[in-house]
Amino acid sequence: MKACWYEHTGPARDVLKIGTMGDPLPGAGEVLVELRASGINPSDTKQRAGWRGFRTKFPQVIPHADGAGTIVAVGDGVSPSRLRTKVWLFNAVALYDGSRWQGTAASLCALPSEQAIELPAPMNEMEGACLGVPACTAHRAVYADGPVSGMTVLVQGGAGAVGHYAIQFAKLGGATVVATVSSEQKALHAKSAGADFVLNYRLDNVLALIQDLTKGQGVDRIVEVDLGANMTLDVQVVKANGHIASYSSTSVPEPVFPYYPLAFKGVTVRMVQGFNMPDLARRQAVEDIRRWSERDQLTHAIGATYPMKDIVQAHE
């Protein structure tokens, strides 16, 4: 098969290689997928770069956890009825727990059958490759603590891949959504996802505006893109007994935790890890994404597409 891989971590143009290697075979309980699209997420580029000292134990790594394509072979224990099914994939590569090294940056990928989800009819493979990390992470961040109907949800970073889905999912759940962005272009993107209010944190007094929009009550839930950077604001605007669901803290990887300001409000702070969702949460995310997709209620933001030969530029 044709594939891209790296043998040690570092800058994309220094470590990524393209060539051929033997076709993978589906083991027991696995399917073999002929890929049409491979999704690149920040986690993929961070792992390849060796972010925070990350090192892989494998001699080779085919990157990318997300993708979409068609099942072309099945292993023992998998029904032949799955053959020729179009699917989207999640957790194709699993480097943090050291269990899988063959991701979707290849023409073929073998992985457990339950990680290949039938592609809803209105969607194409490019859109399907957006779902594994961004959409499932967004679903967990929005719904980990129950329904959001009638609530106000703040989505920090509403123009990002996770934020764009989080806005849609919260709206579909009946919430009022406030999103923060850093530019007018990003504001338009967040509005296109359905945000009720979009605030530019570079220009606006976000604290004052949220207090005004919520009549001083604050927000019920926060979907947080950068916990360390936004902790001060989050503490000020979250309601008593509210929830903060954070899926990253890139700017401040080891934030100071303001225990008592959160404790006095009874706030729950939840860490969301899209690669390590509880089985029930994953199943619910998959089911909701299927239902909303079949009703054509979701939009998928594809920033750019590249042929495999340009994977270095794609990572950069």
Image (tube, helix red, strand yellow):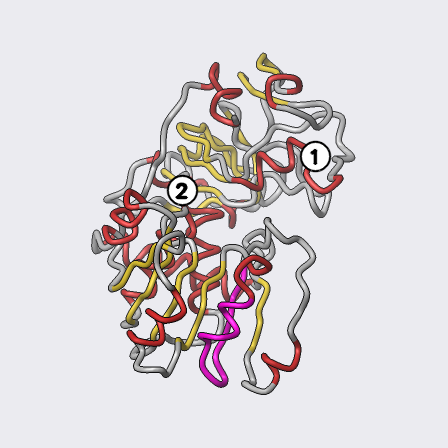
- Report the amino acid beneath label 1: Gly
Q: Position of residue 128 (x, y in %)?
A: 37, 41
> What residue sits right under mark 2 in the picture?
130
Q: Nearer the viewer, residue 84 or 50?
A: 50
Question: Looking at the image, is 14 positioned above or below residue 127?
Answer: above
User: Which residue occupies the foreground of this view, 305 or 281?
Assistant: 305
Q: Give the structural element (helix, strand or loop) at label 1.
A: loop
* Location of residue 28 with respect to 236 vertically, above or below: above
Q: Which residue is drawn at 42% across and 66% down?
A: 142
Secondary structure under badge 2?
A: loop
Point out the stretch of residues depicted in magenta: 232-246
Q: From mark 1 to mark 2, how far is it between C-alphas?
A: 23 Å
Q: Crowdedness of circle 2 by 10 Å Cα count: few (<14), some, many (20+)?
A: many
The picture places residue 31, in percent across and down from the top left corner, at 52, 38
Residue topped by disc 1 = 50
Residue 13, magenta (yes or no)? no
Label 2 amino acid?
Answer: Cys
Please state the horizontal and vertical placement of residue 70, each as a whole percent of the image: 40, 33
